[in-house]
Amino acid sequence: LACLPELAQKTRAEPGCLDYVIYQPDADPSELFLYERYVDADALEAHKAADHCRRIVLTQIIPCLELREVIAAKKLA
């Protein structure tokens, strides 16, 4: 949890980031939902390659996860 504010701040500052919000359900504070929106697939790939993303997500967050599920979606209306 301690690294999430830095990740959110730096991700929101990326040119292609439209939205980056972290949710913690009231029913289970051990779960987190990261809602991310980018202008296009290239912006998402740039985010994944960004130094702050690789450093924080790959080395600090993912090793602590019990489960990680990524759901890609498109806006319908």
Image: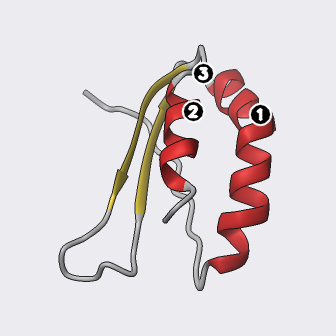
- On screen, residue 58 versus residue 36, left or right, reads right
- The span from disc 2 to disc 3 (Cα, nearest Å) is 5 Å
The answer to whether 46 is drawn above or below residue 15 in the figure is below
Type of amino acid at the residue the image marks with label 2: Thr
* Relative height, residue 47 to residue 26 (above, below): above
Give the numbered dot on residue 14: 3
Coordinates of residue 71 in the picture (x, y in percent): 51, 56
Q: Looking at the image, do the residues carrying marks 3 and 1 touch, with CB atoms under 8 Å apart? A: yes
Dot label at residue 50: 1
Q: Nearer the viewer, residue 76 or 16?
A: 16
- Disc 2 crowd, CA 10 A, few/some/many (<14, 14-19, 20+): many
Q: CA distance from mark 3 to mark 1?
A: 9 Å
Task: Compute the Cα span from label 1 to label 2.
Answer: 9 Å
Q: Residues within 10 Å of mark 1 (few under 14, many from 20)?
A: some
**What kind of element bears circle 1?**
loop
Mark 1 and mark 2 in contact? Answer it, CB < 8 Å: yes
Instruction: Tell me residue 54's x, y (percent).
Output: 79, 48
> Residue drawn at (48%, 47%), measured in percent from left and top?
5
The C terminus is located in which quarter?
A: top left
**Point 73% across, 76% down: residue:** 63
**Label 3 sits on what residue type?**
Glu
Residue type at mark 1 is: Ala
Residue 52: give x, y in percent of width and height.
72, 40
The residue to which callout 2 is attached is 11
Q: Are marks 2 and 3 in contact (CB under 8 Å)?
A: yes
User: Upstream in the sequence, badge 1 or badge 2?
Assistant: 2
| Residue 13 quadrant | top right
- Tell me the SS state at disc 2: helix
